[in-house]
Image (cartoon, coloured by chain):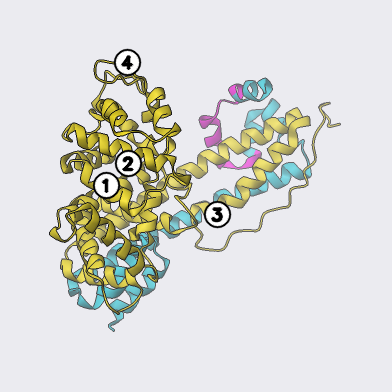
Chain colours: A yellow, B cyan
Amino acid sequence: MSKNGSLEQPSTVPESQKPPEGSSVKGWFEDLKKRYKSALKESKKGNTWKEKIFFFLTAFLARVNQLSEEEQKIEDEAAAKTGEVLMQMPSEQIVSVVEKELVGGIGFIDPIVHDFTVASVNVGKGFGTQKFGKISKAMDKMKTGEGVPETLRPDEKAILMAFGLKTVTALKNNPAYDTVEKFAAALGKFDEATKNGKGLQYLKQPKIKELFKFDAGDMAALFKFKELLPDISFDKKVWGMEWSIGSGKLKSSELQRKLTSAPLSYEEAMNLQGSFALLFPNTKDANRAKALMTINQIVLKDGGFPTNRHIAELVFSIDTRDIEKLSEILQA
Amino acid sequence: MSSIQDTILQLLEKSSLPGLYKVLIRNLLPNMSRVQQDNLFVILSKEASKKNILSMKAEKIYDQYNSILNNLQRDPTTFDEGIYGKKQTYTTASGGQLSNLKQQLDLEALKKQVGGK
């Protein structure tokens, strides 16, 4: 018992080791955060002890957040200004460095690697230095681990998707890849040509596919449609909205059930295509139905990852203006 | 390689710039004009200097809150007088920096939150 009569909980959490000099804000406080949280967890039986730990933990987290924001500002500023210097360099020099990095050496550069790199450099320049700094930071996060890392914030994921969409659209306009077959084959070659690359993992096809994985959660970034369609009631996920189709009143939950339960026939897809009219207004009805069937196939596949063929089908089903609009919305 | 290029590469090692930017700088540095190299040097030096100041702030906060937790774990009644009685004593005893905490936090609200769980 403590002197004020409550049952206190002595801690068994070991003391922190001071982080090395030059650590990031996260590096400085990761261990100490864990200690505070463990102490809070341990303290369930001792109310006054718990109250004190909670008090200091809250204050501590406020200070850490403040420092993290300062750190973010410093990093963003450095990236934006460095971007200005890099943007002055000739595009062909930038392309040469990126494509060598993608294939892992100075050897043969497959034309698809070159074309993809040219497209991404041009698209990247179009985003401007501030946004491209953010895209590049998000790319770094994509390098780590399997799948889309949890540390990728929704806004980072959205801007990477926007960047990917624009790049894909630029490739679609290239006469060398102007059919579904040629496009899918080119993506296959791209996978093969970049498998030994040392860096820039996001620019490799498998990483992009991970980002474009189709499931309800991954569609969350699209909730920004709310700003464009104020009359429609949105949840935080696009599938959660009450979305009437044409003259019918099919709800999003029904649409989701249809898309995730069984393969759609073309007739059924044609009946449902109106649900995508808001998403892809410039795309023809028949092409929207095709896109719906492709999404249905991707969702029904294990893991929801699109194949190269699926990506190519989507790219050629959906009108370029709609893809670009989607990219703009994701950046908003 | 010139000394400014060497210095830029050294600064780049510790910089938080995105990986893509680092790769581009390492490869394109010799092709850059002197003005561009000077600009990069200034950007990276400023970043390093600001990060250094930030790191000192982090160390101060680390020491402060590490010490608070160590003291509490050694003796759970530490700060009792300050928190439950004379708040001024608590502020003085814990160092001037803790006065910020009083502004940021409503202790009574926290007591209710904790008590409610």
Q: Are marks 2 and 3 on the same chain?
A: yes
- Disc 2 vs disc 4: which is toward the camera? 2
User: Which labelled disc corresponds to residue A249?
Assistant: 4
Q: Earlier in the sequence, mark 1 or mark 4?
A: 4
How many circles with numbers are drawn on the protein? 4
Q: Which residue is mark 2?
A: A294
Q: In percent of the image, x 28 and y 60: which residue is there?
A: A185
A254 versus A143 height, above or below:
above
Quadrant where the C terminus of chain A sits is top left
The residue under label 1 is A313
Badge 4 element: loop
A244 vs A47: above or below: above
| CA separation in Å, label 1 and label 4 | 28 Å
Q: In this rendering, does residue A214 appear at all?
A: no
Q: Amino acid at mark 3?
A: Trp
Q: Which residue is mark 3?
A: A28
Cα separation between marks 2 and 3: 47 Å
- The amino acid type, in three-letter code, at marker 4 is Lys
The answer to whether tags 2 and 4 share a subunit is yes
User: Which chain is indicated by disc 4?
Assistant: A
